[in-house]
Amino acid sequence: MLVLGIDPGAMATGYGMVARSDGVLRALEYGSIITTPSDPFPTRLQQIYNRLTQLIQRYQPEGAAIESLVFAKNAQSAFKLGQARGVAILAAALSGLTIAEYTPLQIKSAVTGYGAAGKRQVQQMVGTLLSLDQPVRSTDAADALAVAICHHHSARLLRLTRDGRR
């Protein structure tokens, strides 16, 4: 199963393509879509949409997983984050992908076993779970990979529960 994990943001949207084969998770590609703050906001949203659409067309994932909206300190930031998130969901939906949403608590728990884990702990565990040679430097990319890992764990649990095994 191949999943696109997305950590939405107006300045930087993290993405991570994670495959599971024979019970082993592997990152195929990950990074951040960086937008230029001086560009008009609709242009920045279009950049996010275009890059995610390119990734979906290239890899043909079976689903997408995205971090759910958390409360922002300022309303303007929350609106921009919501718009970036909406564009990411739209890119996945128009490509025919199923979309799952996870809270930061669910993601951190799935990756580290601790819902209040810090950014560095998440980055380290992402590297360990994906057997990466180098640590993921971008927190946005690490978070996107963590979202995809969370989805893989959740999908596996749902399959086991549905099939009557635990």
Image (cartoon, rainbow, N blue to C red):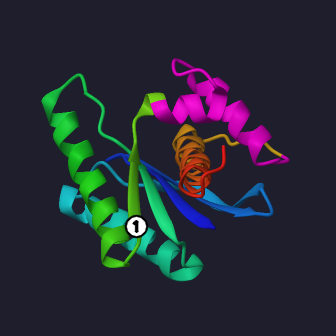
Residue 110 point in image, percent of width and height: 59, 35
Q: Residue at 22% across / 46% down in the picture? A: 82
Q: Nearer the viewer, residue 158 or 108?
A: 158
The image quarter in which residue 21 lies: bottom right
Up the image or down, 90 lies above or below 123; here it is: below
Q: Is residue 49 left or right of residue 20?
A: left
- Whether residue 111 appears in magenta in the rendering, the answer is yes
Given the current orientation, which residue lies at the most extreme bottom position?
Answer: 57
How packed mark 1 is, by other alpha carbons closer than 10 Å (few <14, some 14-19, many 20 or more), is some
Q: Nearer the viewer, residue 88 or 93?
A: 93
Quarter of the rendering occupied by the N terminus:
bottom right
Q: Amino acid at mark 1?
A: Thr
Res. 135 in view: no
Res. 71 in view: yes
Up the image or down, 115 lies above or below 155; here it is: above
> Mark 1 — residue?
98
Quarter of the rendering occupied by the C terminus:
top right
- Whether residue 135 appears in magenta in the rendering, the answer is no
Q: Residue at 56% across / 49% down in the picture? A: 161
Q: Residue at 65% across / 28% down in the picture? A: 112
Q: Is residue 41 left or right of residue 157?
A: left
The image quarter in which residue 86 lies: bottom left
| Residue segment shown in magenta | 106-133
Given the current orientation, which residue lies at the most extreme top position?
Answer: 116
Q: Residue at 53% across / 56% down in the picture? A: 162
Up the image or down, 52 lies above or below 101; here it is: below
Secondary structure category for the residue under label 1: strand
